[in-house]
Amino acid sequence: MKSNFCLLFLVLGSSQATTLHFPSQREDDLATTEELEIVPGATWTDINTGKHIQAHGAGINKVGRTYYMLGEDKDSTAYFQSVSCYSSQNLVEWRYEGAALSRNDSIPDLKTKRIVERPKVLYNRKTRKYVMYAHIDNGEATDDLAVRKDARVGVATADQICGPYEYKGGFRPLGQQSRDIGLYQDDDGSGYLLTEDRPNGLRIVKLSSDYLNVTENIHLWEGDNVESPALIHHNGYYFMFGSTLSGWKANDNLYSYSKSLSGPWSAWEPFAPVGSGTFSSHTTFVLPLGNDQFIYMGDRWQSNNLLRSTYIWLPLDIKETNVSLKWRDSWILDAKTESWREAPEYREYEAETAQLDDGALDRSCIGCSNGKSVTNLGSVQFSGLDARSATKVTIVLTHAVGGAQQRYAAVTCNGNEQIIAFLPTASNGTDTAGKSTLHCNVLPGKNNVSISRIDGMDAPDLDKVRVPRY
């Protein structure tokens, strides 16, 4: 479907009121269709707090028609803060529901300066409990194993997917170390712990019927040095995905397959282009989308400032026993039809070529298109977004942010205000550019979008705006 667009984009220098309403981006939804895009590596703003989503090392569970994502909060430190819970109807727009498991200084494993990583949850049909497993460790937030030597799993349970979870304790599975972990529930309801045992290798360990303990070792990849495990079952084969041992640094992640959990398993091989470092990410989870389609979920870690860490979600192609991952700048995820499709063509509008008023000026930005961005945001106007049909679309804002903290702006699209976050792009914001997304209901005819500085907060520098062609 092709339409002509006319975009009016305003960047206002005047301050807005300090008190801001954070409406759901799905409230007052006038669009009859949705064409929402996943933009790998971009700032991903939730729909009710206006902050970048904090759900690293996450897993996804579907309850009824709602998806829930539980992961690590790395907003300010590598130490344990909480396990965040988000909900979504479409896997693109996520609402922060709260902390499912929080730091608690009365519980040794959850106290200040502890490590709680890669939380995963299974629902136990017999006990009607949600059971969470996570990697528990002590000492400093470092890759030095002489310091991080607890190497245990922690277990917590809850009556609801978002908790609150009651911590049950930690242990070493079958007496062996456990670092990166994952969980898998087979078709018969049996649960399995995927655990990286550093002295020996990656393991599949069967869980007890209540999922609160382990019973037996199912398979060991002895000496293969693979961590960050994720497991799926597809067309008679099990596929295990994982990362080699390189700390925060990305590497070419691998996969292995077998007709049985106990093996024999194939030799490990890469599923993304060799040398890409799995597009600078580590395997977090593989989500079965339905219709024989899967989503690779990875973390793109920024070890010098974990707040800057983003998410790499991409369609995962599986044909028989061949698995491949291809880079896409963006792609459309349709949860209703359990499918994905390629993103449409788009038009880009350079900020520095637009009308600049109220103090806005262009500056050098080495990593920005044309080597420039607009700073000291005043009034910037673009012409063109004239839609023929009511459609909810994803607009990409390319920006530059220096310093260590994320910045915010109030964005109004056809009268619907949203708070959008912009992650730091480097230690010096003039060196590189990043992307942030907003989802906007466009209506037949002309549409208006404005971005405003929030009182008392620094706004991002603006490079360009990308608008899909519908």
Image (cartoon, rainbow, N blue to C red):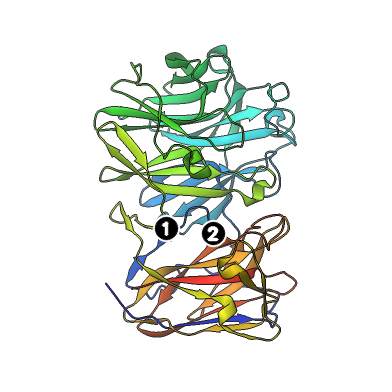
Check disc 2 and report its element: helix, strand or loop. Answer: loop
Query: Seen in the image, is 185 located left or right of residue 83?
Result: left
Q: Mark 2 belongs to which amino acid?
A: Asp
Query: Which mark is nearer the camera, 1 or 2?
Result: 1
Res 397 visible: yes
Gap in angstroms between the C-alphas marked 1 and 2: 18 Å
Q: In the rendered image, which residue does mark 2 sit on?
A: 46
Q: Earlier in the sequence, mark 1 or mark 2?
A: 2
Location of residue 314 in the rendering, given as x and y in whole percent from the top left corner: 41, 48
Q: Quadrant of residue 186?
A: top left
The residue at which mark 1 appears reads as: 330
Question: Element under label 1?
Answer: loop
Percent from the top left, x then y, of residue 352? 59, 78
Q: Is residue 344 left or right of residue 153?
A: left
Q: Is residue 465 left or right of residue 125?
A: right
Q: Residue at x 60, y 37 (%)?
A: 249
* Label 1 Cα neighbours within 10 Å, binned few <14 / some 14-19 / many ≥20: many
* Residue at (35, 16) in percent of width and height: 262
Is residue 25 or residue 271 the one in the foreground? 271
Answer above or below: position of 230 versus 427: above
Q: Amino acid at mark 1?
A: Ser
Residue 216 at what x, y percent from top left?
44, 13
Q: Quadrant of residue 409?
A: bottom right
Q: Residue 398, how many percent across, how many down?
A: 55, 66
